[in-house]
Image: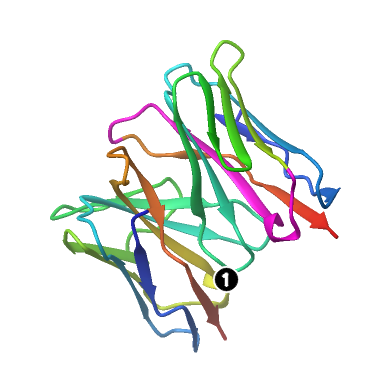
Amino acid sequence: QKEVEQDPGPLSVPEGAIVSLNCTYSNSAFQYFMWYRQYSRKGPELLMYTYSSGNKEDGRFTAQVDKSSKYISLFIRDSQPSDSATYLCASNSGGYNKLIFGAGTRLAVHP
Amino acid sequence: GAVVSQHPSWVICKSGTSVKIECRSLDFQATTMFWYRQFPKQSLMLMATSNEGSKATYEQGVEKDKFLINHASLTLSTLTVTSAHPEDSSFYICSARGTSGTGRETQYFGPGTRLLVL
């Protein structure tokens, strides 16, 4: 079993839709959770960073962590064609431990 | 957020030659840098972790003699692909651990280097 599982998609939605991207993880020691966005042929860029359980909102993006079910979510409101990218979730237990990435979900938002 | 640069952004070389890729943290000091490889439509595969001034730690299955990593300073790490072969063609991405504007330490990625070995 991979430590971080993520459905690779692809996920196709119309412009304006609410997008829900999800990951599960198996390591109870994970405390830090990130979402990265990667456009084609580019390096990943950090979108959201959360510590422990709870919600974090930044503009149209909301990251949610439920440690009881080991579930990580990213919601995108009013999705735009420019949101079309691959979204990677990542976790680690903090300190100098390496980040464990999900497989990435490819999202396409069509006009 | 913190900025990480990579050079070159793309390189084409002949089989058997060596290629060096540079990774720099531009506005922060990175005690730890990571090198990843990514094949088309696949996720990031961690190759090695390097700490400034010490030897890199390679992931299982990654040949340390083929992928030489040097982390000579707090802002520069290099990956050298020695005797490159067509199967080494991939997208190589470096990452540096640094502190964001919120004061939290996290990982920032470079833009990647596309390597094509003919």
Give the residue at x 34% y 29%. A94
Please tell me which residue is depicted at 84% across the width and 50% down the height of the picture. Answer: A12
Whether residue A92 appears in magenta in the rendering, the answer is yes
Q: Nearer the viewer, residue A17 or A93?
A: A17
Q: Is residue A38 left or right of residue B21?
A: right
How many numbered discs sit on the rendered protein? 1
Please tell me whether mark 1 sits on a helix, a strand or a loop: helix
Q: Is residue B90 left or right of residue A80?
A: left
Spot occupied by residue B118 in the image (x, y as percentages of width and height): 57, 86
- The residue tagged 1 is B87
- Does B52 appear above or below A8? below
| Vertical relation: A56 (above or below) B21 | above
Q: Nearest the camera: A58 or B38?
A: A58
Coloring scheme of the render? rainbow
Q: What are the residue bounds of the magenta stretch?
A: A78-96
Q: Residue furthest bottom?
A: B14
